[in-house]
Image (tube, rainbow, N blue to C red):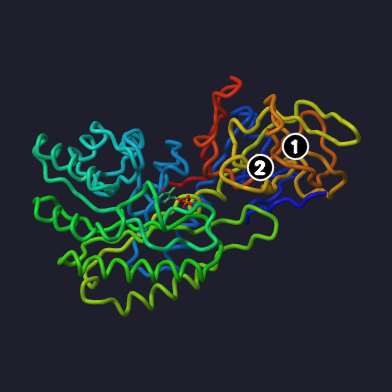
Amino acid sequence: MKPLGPIPPGYAAIDGELAIGGRKASELVAEAGTPLFVYDGALIEARVAALRSALPQRLGLHYAMKANPFAPLLRHIAGLVDGFDIASGGELLMAEAAGVQAERISFAGPGKRDADLEAAISRGVTLNLESAREAERALVIAERVGRAPKLAIRVNPDFDLKGSGMKMGGGAKPFGVDTDGVPALARTIIASGAEWRGFHIYAGSQTLDAAAIVEMQAATLTLAARLAEESGAVLPVCNLGGGFGIPYFPGDLPLDLAAVGAALAKRFAALPEVLQETAFCIELGRYLVGEAGVYLTRIIDRKESHGEVFLVTDGGLHHQLAASGNFGTVVRRNYPSAIATRFGASVEEEASVVGCLCTPLDRLADKGGFPRAEEGDLVAVFCAGAYGASASPVHFLGHGPAAERLVNARS
Ligand SMILES: *Cc1c(COP(=O)(O)O)cnc(C)c1O
């Protein structure tokens, strides 16, 4: 038997069934069908509250919306965080539709097209510039539309986040401007009459190691101070990136938020002159929403092959690519999962949960221990609130999208 990842806190059983936001899985799928993503709004609120209480007040909290752009979830989270970080013109429209004011939006991402730059500039969205050439194009477009653009530089830091799932900084990268080119570009932007919005320094994602985040944030502040000095101007804004991970796999332990907060508070109490007036923020995706989502599928067939049990579901990697192990992981390990209609029942057999796609890659749980499940039972895959529905190849094999629901959201 292979271990399953840890089921996140906040999921109880009602009448022997998984409940999400106080509603039984069978009830939710009776309304919305399967496959279904359910997001618990109260768990997102609780996560934001935990961050607010652990981290210094001075630190703004942004949502990196590529983690989950489901419209009701965006509206919910818009009332909870200080800003939104977007990565495309499409996300700009979605953030706008969710009622997020342009002043609260910043736009990072390589390959911004002229139309994207124009949309952002004419609305007053901050651009996190990925290259000197992008800065030139933004200034030309700003001139044409007659608005002073809000410009920040995305810095490609000389370090990366240790223990990070996806390395985004350190060495040659398509993201951001190499540090040695930053001061000159900052001077150009400031001299152009643009509204100078400082630095965006993002060094990686998905770490559970508080010490690694503390070290990264310290290095980020040191780098920001040096680059601000060399740019000859105080720094109005500094986005410190994110990187806060969630436990997905067996043995993973939650990030020690208190340790991160305490170390950052100390740093903030001893900032150099050039950062005294700086507005700081972090940008989080999965940490805010990942554990608040569950992917529910129904067992269509129960079969055995060469002595192994396969629970064949109506879902699969076309909705939840990451759980199949095909989204940026090297070694496939099991996400947390359970038989939702027998939640909390004891383990009776080893079974693999597979999807309905004709590819051996389509495996949601490999040789896990489950109570005996039958046709019609529901399977829950946890940690499905981030990089699920919108980060999976939904058109592959033509089964169509999963339904999505936000429950338990007061706002
Ligand atoms: C994807 C991304 C994030 C969010 O990453 P998570 O691991 O989901 O927190 C934040 N900032 C940038 C620049 C990103 O590209």
- Is residue 279 shown left or right of residue 145? right
Q: Label 2 belongs to which residue?
A: 381
Query: Does the CB distance between marks 1 and 2 fall below 8 Å?
Result: yes
SS type, badge 1 = strand
Residue at x-position 57% and y-position 50%: 291
| Residue named by callout 1 | 353
Residue with the most extreme right position:
307
Spatial separation of the CA atoms under disc 1 and disc 2: 10 Å
Q: Earlier in the sequence, mark 1 or mark 2?
A: 1
Q: Specify the quadrant of the image occupied by residue 117.
A: top left
Where is residue 124 drawn, in percent x and y?
19, 43
Seen in the image, is 347 located left or right of residue 206? right
Is residue 77 or residue 391 the one in the foreground? 391
Q: Position of residue 242 (x, y in %)?
A: 43, 58
Q: As shown in the figure, which amino acid type bears the numbered disc 1?
A: Val
Report the side of 337 relative to 213 (left or right).
Answer: right
Label 1 CB sits under 8 Å from any ligand 1 atom:
no
Amino acid type of disc 2? Answer: Val
Q: Can you name the residue that lies furthest to the top here?
A: 398
In percent of width and height, residue 42 lies at 51, 51
| Residue 22 horizontal side relative to residue 68, left or right | right
Q: Which percent across, then down, holds residue 99? A: 31, 40
Give the mark toward the camera: 1 or 2: 1
The dot on residue 232 is: none
Q: Where 8 falls versus 261 (above or below)?
A: above
Q: Secondary structure at mark 2?
A: strand
Q: Residue at x 30, y 37 (%)?
A: 112
